[in-house]
Amino acid sequence: MSDFTAHLDTFARDNLPPDDQWPAFNLDLPELDYPARMNCATELLDKMVAAGHGERPLFYTTSETWSYGDLLEQANRIARVLVEDLSLAPGNRVLIRAANNPMFMACWFAVAKAGGIVVATMPLLRAKELGAIVDKAQIGLALCDERLAEEMEAAVALAPVCERVCYFNGSGAPGAGAELEHRMAEKPTDFVNLETAAEDIVLIAFTSGTTGKPKGTMHFHRDVMAICDCFPRSVLKPSAEDIFIGSPPLAFTFGLGGLVTFPMRVGAATVLLEAAPPPKLIESIERFKATICVTAPTAYRAMVDQARHYDLTSLRQCVAAGEHLPLPTFEAWRDVTGIEIINGIGTTEMLHIFISAAGADIRPGATGKPIPGYEAMVVDEAMNPLPPGEVGRLAVRGPTGCRYLADERQTSYVVDGWNLTGDAYKTDADGYFWFQARTDDMIVSAGYNISGPEVEEALMAHDLVRDCAVVAAPDEERGSIVKAFVILGPGNPGTPALVEALQNFVKQTIAPYKYPRAVVFVDSLPRTETGKVQRFKLRAMELEPAARAAAG
């Protein structure tokens, strides 16, 4: 790591893992030969406008269109507000809270331009989760969509280190949720971007681990550029004429890359939908004549039956990530659209997709092969490579990698320079990687990572719950669902009404998508002699019916 930094606030840099806990990095590709000083906002936005893309459309929404020039002007105005009015210092963390809309990304680029560190959060997060993020990253300033103010204010009460919230997308009246726009109106449209180091941190992306404690993954300016110059360049191969569309939240690194930075790298456009359930997504593909769709396998499954009722002839590429792409989904989508979905695996720690395949290289059912710039292997517990056909842990390394914010779990994610993703894989004789399962207690449901222990904690806060355990249960539509085994206090019958009450309770405690879609009342839970719940036994119980059904 370079000694030079433009950050005056060195909190994030000071809380990087020790050098000996870093993964090995591969920057040998010519396109990854970045200068020592680089700001990703300059590369993706300012230089694109300077190259003549200023009038080209960038963001389409259901109500407006922003050009590259529009985004540059708005980001510059916000950057001035941050520096001149809100006293942002380089290296300060700024929380951004909004749905997928142009102002979200104007804030994102403004923070990067000013040398700040973006901490983007999903609209569905509750105050408890937001407060934990604010406290972990020591965030003093938040930019928040006014429509999400209630949970934001509650989070600030829990984490008073956040001293300032500036709202936008409000009613337009001063003090009514449009403070940012009112301040922007007084600013000129030019801004001199801070000359950050390529290895200055620009993004802390939070992901929940098996314990439910938030993990902040820290990424450099060069990391943001590296994901644009690897998967899109070698696999997706977009052009300036493409129109991207999809459903991942921009707070997910999957959405940030697939819906914003990938198209911007080539001068393409993208459709931003604040909500993109499958019916809305497929209708919008037709409406905007989108050419590249980026979403979770669950959405493709849901859209199969509707596909015949829409004109999808504009589509030329479809990308799936966030969970394993089942072969039946791949085949059904291909049969109805003629398009073979590009499968891929990426993690928040790695920032984006690192194993994939497209076109003639697709092997249905497999994830693919490591993309140029990355290496991957399947290893045993001692980090020995396993031969084809044997299931083990997925290990990967490349131009990006895991650097947790002050977290002891760094040593279990990075071993001998390799990133261990928590996935069980096997390879075949031709070098293709085949997903088998998750190796931890993370539940992947409809593309969302859900921590079982976090759901358990929410359930245990209910007065009638004495104990519980949460695992993944197979589900044809969502891949997996959250299933809770609940022990009630004496004299409380387990009724359907109580199931609904517990589900609603969880929805009000943590993000609603994490609630247990199945609840079973039990008298006891399997435990070790030391009292630890044996979740693997519960998972095995859930997998047995699916295995019998598959065996026919």
Image: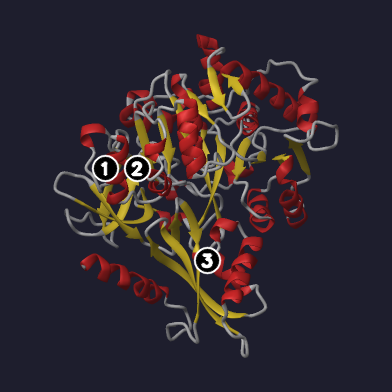
Mark before the other along the chain sequence, 3 or 2: 2
160 vs 294, left or right, is right
**Disc 3: which residue:** 516
Quadrant of residue 550 in the image? bottom left
Of residues 20 and 45, which is closer to you in this image?
45
Mark before the other along the chain sequence, 2 or 1: 2
Q: Are marks 2 and 1 in contact (CB under 8 Å)?
A: yes
Q: Position of residue 164 (x, y in %)?
A: 78, 42
Label 3 – label 2 distance at C-alpha: 27 Å
Q: Residue at x 54, y 82 (%)?
A: 487
Q: Are marks 1 and 3 in contact (CB under 8 Å)?
A: no
**Disc 2: which residue:** 344
Q: Position of residue 406 (x, y in %)?
A: 56, 52
Q: Name the residue type under label 3.
A: Pro
- The disc placed on residue 163 is none
Residue most extreme to the front:
309
Residue 241 visible from this viewpoint: yes
Residue most extreme to the right:
174
Label 2 – label 1 distance at C-alpha: 7 Å
Q: Name the residue type under label 1.
A: Gly
**Disc 1: which residue:** 368
Q: Position of residue 450 (x, y in %)?
A: 50, 58
SS under mark 1:
loop
Q: Name the residue type under label 2.
A: Gly
Q: Residue at x 59, y 67 (%)?
A: 503
Q: Residue at x 71, y 40 (%)?
A: 144
Image position of 274 with respect to 523: above or below: above
Of residues 422 and 404, which is closer to you in this image?
422
